[in-house]
Amino acid sequence: MAGRKRKAGRAAGYKLLIFGILTLCVILIAVFAPYLTPYDPYAQDLSNALQPPGPDHLLGTDRYGRDMLSRVIMGSRTTIFSALLLVAIITLAGGAVGIVCGYYGGKLDSFLMRVSDVFLAFPGMVFAIAAASVLNRGVLNAVIALACISWPRYARITRSQVLAVKDAPYIMAARLSGSGTWKIIRKHIIPNIAGQVIVTAVLDIGTMIMEISGLSFLGLGAAPPTAEWGSMMSNGRSMLQTAPWVILSPGCAIFLTVMVFNLTGDTVRDFLDPRYRGKRRRE
Amino acid sequence: MKKRSGILTACLLTVCLLSGCGSQERGTAEITGEKVFYYGDTTFNAENDEKDVNPHNGYSGWACIRYGIGETLFKYSDSMELEPWLAAEYELLDENTWVVTLRDGVTFTSGRTMDAEAVKECLDHLIEVHERAKGDLKIQEITAEGQTLTIRTREPVPALMNYLADPYGCIIDMQAGITEDGNVSGTGPYRATEVQTDVGLTLVKNENYWDGTPKLDMIYVRTITDGDTMTMAMQTGELDAAYGLPYSSLSLFANDPYTISSVETSRSFFAQMNYATEALQDPNVRAAIAGAVDKEGFTQVLLEGNGSAANGPFPESLAFGDASVTAQSYDPEESRRLLAASGWTDTDGDGYVDRDGETLSIRWLTYPSRQELPLLAESVQASLKEIGIQVEVNCTANHLDFIESGEWDIYASAFVCAPTGDPEYFFTTHCLDDSTKNRGGYHSDRLEELETQMSGTFDPDERAALATEMTQTILDDNAFVFAAHLKMSIVSGEGVTGLTAHPCDYYEITVDLDKN
């Protein structure tokens, strides 16, 4: 039994390494996108429109003659960065609300939780579409729209975690030894609840990529000519039968990236699972 | 065993569910031996102001005439010349008086005979409720006697007979009235039995049609606004014919059993400049922009050949069309020179020209319901960048709100510039001081003068010459940039005959339509 657990722990370690490297690669591609594109992703060349994939253009060209590979690489920047930004915003905002509610409790807790209930009561994507329409087109507005509906989940998770630890003996001890509220939250609460929140956040990156691309696909996210995977797919929609590479290239990019982030999230969760953690420490 | 029976039940249930998806109408038609036709169209919807088939309501006359429900007094030939239809002939008594002799033996689908009194009732109602018709026709009085209709206008309207051939001029029986859902009794080969805005209509054969026997018993017109859905419906055989397929899909129907009927129309895609924008008040800047639009690339590549590069508002097939005028030619080098001559150069090296520390940036407003317009916007964005002009595209269904608030510099739209085969309509709607669609505040003394002449000229050749001069005036001013004329295409499926695209864009279902 112990042997099996140890093996599982080690396997989680290797998996984390592999997916960590893959995630890093994806993020590095996004960071260095402008230096990696073989062509200018925005330069139109109508004489080269709708070229199928070939040696000159590995993923073909779109109807404006723009190189699809360059646009997919450039699009990774918009899509992945906005997803990361979104996850960061909702983790921080939701987390802060959760900590305040969990730690202080009382009327403030009731009020903020009712507000979050209101947000949770809306069907998420419908609310995001409405918010994005009101805010006008743009990736940043899509991020704001999605942040509006996604923070309550984080607030709830953080709050429940804080409630679980706030009466633990070590917090009592810290309080007795004269630590202030801020110090207790910073030194004792956040480190103890961070694991669960981070796992949720990492698992959410893939979903957020899908949602941002979804809004762009509907014409509510990135505005042309910005290279963004969702809007690129939307532009190529009518060419699915005649020039499938225009829609398949960004589609595959979304699929692969979401898969990498999701598997990384799963692995992080496995890795942080206390059932394996104890074993690893002892080893 | 349990698992297997579970799978079996699931399969059976799926089959049962899917069997409901088949067309019930089709099944019924096969049993009764009726000829049923399925027609897909993108335009029959409220967004296009085509809510029903009542010609006296907005642009619904287009649906009325398109689907063979109504007919007008005169119609257009393939070269957009007037031909008799419900009227046999007309005569101009004096500048303000027209005598129209109606055809004998025409009946409405309500059973009433079409005589001058019926036409008078229809036209009286039209000018009472339809603002556009009222403005075009300027009718003072109509008198009816037997089959002779005398129309007196308030002022000379040389194109009166052309205007009466506009879809709003469909003759309907006002005694039978207009139903609550916007259905009417016309004189066409088919009559509508069911009208559903944004969904479609059901048409049945008019047994008493005056000009032959309609060959189909029933036609279902389906509104399918999504081009891809329509493409697939056409491929699976759910539709017998379709209008408004995306250009990128047309190549799928290039071979048997499909046929494509295409014709160049006077629907033009063009941009108008906002004279309230300081930079655009400079003729050099307007000329630079006009000369930087790659019209050939737009029509040949982005419209995939389904359009032709335009000089002015009218296609070459018209006497006053593109062949007789010249526009700023595509020459980015010349555009750069023009900008530099006005002091616009790239001093900060950001790729965009600037003057007094301000970058030349243009807000390009357009809308998505015409699929060509976003393509034009994105292509212009790239080609103007070449000459150093920054373009911010605002492609929104709310375009009219932005027009009203003045938050735009160039507005690109699509418009049928000569729906009646007469040139005056475009100028009166778009270019004069009192034109409702002169959104950019363009003014030209010369153009106003020419329009005054045009409004009193009856001779078609003289009108054509004036139209040419007027077009050249707006092109010399670069107040408008005409990018392309649309080629309209109708795709017919196997065995379909008698469906041909017409340059006026609104004759589709006729008595000749058949399916074998």
Image (cartoon, coloured by chain):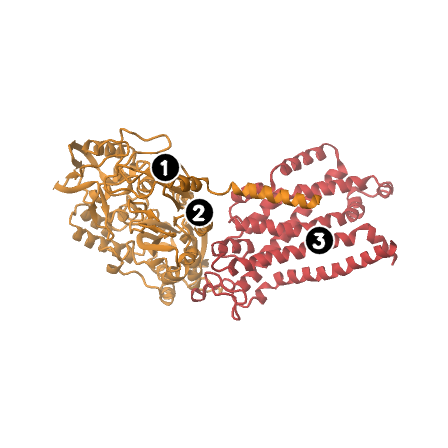
Chain colours: A red, B orange
Foreground residue among B366 and A231: A231
Q: Position of residue B134 (x, y in %)?
A: 26, 37
Badge 1 crowding class, 10 Å Cα cut-off, few under 14, some 14 to 19, many 20 or more, is many
Marks 2/3: CA–CA distance: 45 Å
In the rendered image, which residue does mark 1 sit on? B52
* Residue A79 relative to residue B310: left or right: right
- For mark 2, give the secondary structure: loop
On the same chain: label 3 and label 1? no
Q: Amino acid at mark 2?
A: Glu
Which element carries disc 1, helix, strand or loop?
Answer: loop
Dot 2: chain letter: B
Q: Which residue is mark 3?
A: A265
Q: Nearer the viewer, residue B18 or B41?
A: B18
Q: Which residue is mark 2?
A: B238
Number of the front mark, 2 or 3: 2
Q: Using the image as rendered, state which of residue B432 and residue B227 is in the foreground.
A: B227
The answer to whether the residue labelled 1 contacts the one labelled 2, judged by CB atoms less than 8 Å apart, is: no
Mark 1 vs 2, N-terminal side: 1
Query: SS at mark 3?
Result: helix
Apparent side of residue B232 relative to residue B11 in the rendered image (left or right): left
Q: Quadrant of the N terminus of chain B?
A: top right
Q: Chain of mark 3?
A: A
Classify mark 2: residues with Cα within 10 Å, few (<14), some (14-19) or many (20+).
Answer: some
Tell me the subunit letter for badge 1. Answer: B
In-front residue for pair A104/B77: B77
Instruction: Please report the residue visible at 65 percent of the width from the left and 45 percent of the height from the top.
Output: B7
Q: Residue furthest bottom?
A: A55
Question: Percent x, y for residue B386?
Answer: 43, 64
Counting from the top left corner in percent of width and height, residue B121 is at: 23, 31
**Depicted A188 relative to depicted B176: above or below:** below
Q: Position of residue B495 (x, y in %)?
A: 36, 51
Q: Is B513 situated left or right of A146 in this image?
A: left
